[in-house]
Amino acid sequence: MGIGECIFDPDRRAVLKARFLAKHPKSAFYADFADFSFWRVAMDEAHLNGGFARAGKFKGEPS
């Protein structure tokens, strides 16, 4: 659970795009498509279901 924000600002988008392409270089093909966007997600809490007796809740770090 958290808040998602689509990044429209060209300067912030350029930073996120560079970081994304550093980890996923083959994605350069579609990173500038009109239907491709970058999002910042501020996590408040996450729930992990890792199988039998391996579930847990995790709190996000304050931003």
Image: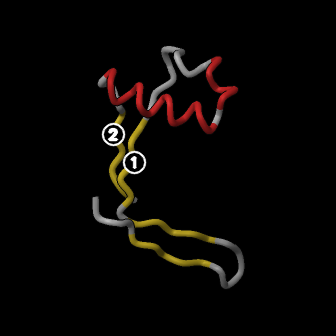
Q: Residue at x 61, y 19 (%)?
A: 30
Q: Viewer-proximal residue, 47 or 18? A: 18
Q: Residue at x 65, y 17 (%)?
A: 29
View extreme (bottom): residue = 53
What element does badge 2 sit on?
Answer: strand
Q: Residues within 10 Å of mark 2 (few under 14, many from 20)?
A: few
Q: Is residue 22 left or right of residue 8?
A: right
Which three-letter amino acid code belongs to the residue tagged 2?
Glu
Q: Residue at x 66, y 29 (%)?
A: 25
Image quadrant in which the C terminus is located:
bottom left
Q: Relative to 35, is 39 above or below?
A: below
- Judging by the rendered image, the residue that carries numbered circle 1 is 41
- Judging by the rendered image, the residue that carries numbered circle 2 is 5
Q: Residue at x 39, y 27 (%)?
A: 13
The residues tagged by marks 1 and 2 sit, at their Cα atoms, a distance apart of 6 Å
Rendering coords of residue 22 (x, y %): 59, 34
Which three-letter amino acid code belongs to the residue tagged 1?
Val
Q: Disc count in the image?
A: 2
Colouring of the image: secondary structure
Picture quadrant where residue 61 is located: bottom left
Rendering coords of residue 36 (x, y %): 51, 23
Q: Is residue 45 left or right of residue 53?
A: left
Q: Viewer-proximal residue, 18 or 30? A: 18
Q: Relative to 51, is 29 above or below?
A: above
Q: Are marks 1 and 2 in contact (CB under 8 Å)?
A: yes
